Image: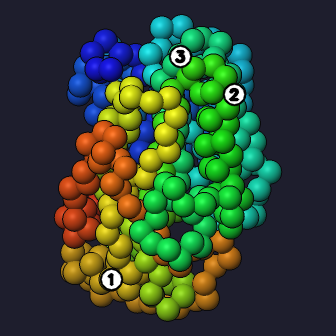
Amino acid sequence: MTLNNQKILITGGAGFIGSHLADHLLSLNCSVIVLDNLEAFYDPAIKRRNIAHNLDNPNYQFIEGDILDMDTLMGLDDDITAIVHLAAKAGVRPSIANPVAYQESNVKGTQNMLEMARAKGITQFVFASSSSVYGINPDVPWKESNYVLQPISPYASTKVSGELLGHVYSHLYDIRFIGLRFFTVYGPRQRPDLAIHKFARKILAGEEIPVFGDGTTRRDYTFVADIVQGITAAIQYDKSQYEVVNVGNCDTVSLSDMISTIEQVFGIEAKINRLPMQPGDVPQTFADVSKAGELFGYKPSTSFKKGIEAFHQWITAEQVVEA
Ligand code: NAD
């Protein structure tokens, strides 16, 4: 399937990953519809800024609306060719404080999207799953064939549920469902609740950074342009009806090395406030990305240092805008 003449619906398209995906698809001459309720998990003004540069583009349509509202979904265009479903309540720790809201948005919301796809005959559905589905599996790097029915946070369980619902709809209704398990995504416009962004702001302000654990936890940080490459390939994938696929970097960085890379790139020493590990946090994430390579030629190309340099450039420019 090529991208020519496609009309792609991105739910959650005003957020971090979705706004980059919209930019990329527009650059490839696709039509893009973004549906996002601009929820207040973080400042909606940030989301408005993420999309502002596209609002005058005739190939771009922004709809402020909720995936929990079936009337809104059924009112969307009938000639949408693919759905990239990114809208969700994100974040592991807040899901422990508010599990029912996560269930609503992430599970019922995903089912609504699948129902809408079924009703409108939209047969390509890409879903944002997460590395958190692997729980605390010590057997790294994680492969898609690993057992994932032991998540350790409400958020992770909603992502497992999304993958399961996708299988049902793919089996019953011929909807091609590609669940992409993203591994800690970072880069310009990164969500302000995520560690790299939070640390960067505090370091720039000369404040202490809260560091949970002894610094040995490891994350497979994946630069947002690499994630966008994976999503774009999944939109075009047509060889099978149901797949779950890791989209990571296949390289892990310890928390201590993450902080020292920020220090090095920003040229500022961090003040560290060491705190105990948080419930729901996993000790490590590590993607085997060979399946994504085989299925759709996915190949992450941004080193952590290069990615942090791009993030540094963005956040220093942002601070000028905010000042
Ligand atoms: P984000 O919060 O920046 O984007 C999500 C967007 O969804 C937001 O703009 C929000 O307003 C919107 N949204 C939330 N609930 C909605 C609803 N009910 N109706 C309509 N819109 C709604 O998050 P992100 O980091 O860009 O993540 C995008 C997706 O990728 C999410 O599904 C997330 O769980 C998944 N993911 C992200 C990461 C990461 O490291 N950022 C890792 C794994 C998976």
Disc 3 target residue? 122
In this view of the protein, can residue 228 be seen by the observer?
Answer: no
**Quadrant location, the C terminus:** bottom left
Disc 1 target residue? 257
Relative horizontal placement of residue 19, taking residue 118 as reference (left or right): left
Identify the coloring. Answer: rainbow
Identify which residue, 205 or 88, lies in the foreground. 88
In this view of the protein, can residue 134 be seen by the observer?
Answer: yes
Tag 3: amino acid? Ile
User: Which mark identifies residue 33?
Assistant: none
Relative horizontal placement of residue 247, taking residue 260 as reference (left or right): right
Classed neighbour count for the residue bearing mark 3: other residues with Cα under 10 Å, few (<14), some (14–19), many (≥20): many
Q: How far apart are marks 3 and 1 (CA)?
A: 44 Å
Question: Which residue is farthest right?
Answer: 100
Does label 2 point to a residue whose CB lies under 8 Å from ligand 1?
no
Tag 2: amino acid? Asn
Q: Where 224 sits versus 229, above or below?
A: below
Question: Which residue is farthest top?
Answer: 78
- Mark 2: secondary structure: helix
Which label's residue is closer to the chain start, 1 or 2? Answer: 2
Classed neighbour count for the residue bearing mark 1: other residues with Cα under 10 Å, few (<14), some (14–19), many (≥20): some
Identify which residue, 267 or 136, lies in the foreground. 136
Residue shown at the point (57%, 72%) measured from the top left: 137
Classed neighbour count for the residue bearing mark 2: other residues with Cα under 10 Å, few (<14), some (14–19), many (≥20): some
User: Which mark identifies residue 112?
Assistant: 2
Q: Position of residue 235 (x, y in %)?
A: 39, 29
Q: In which quarter of the image is residue 304?
A: bottom left
Q: Position of residue 84 (x, y in %)?
A: 48, 32
Discs 3/1, front: 3
Q: In which quarter of the image is residue 70?
A: top right
- Mark 3: secondary structure: loop
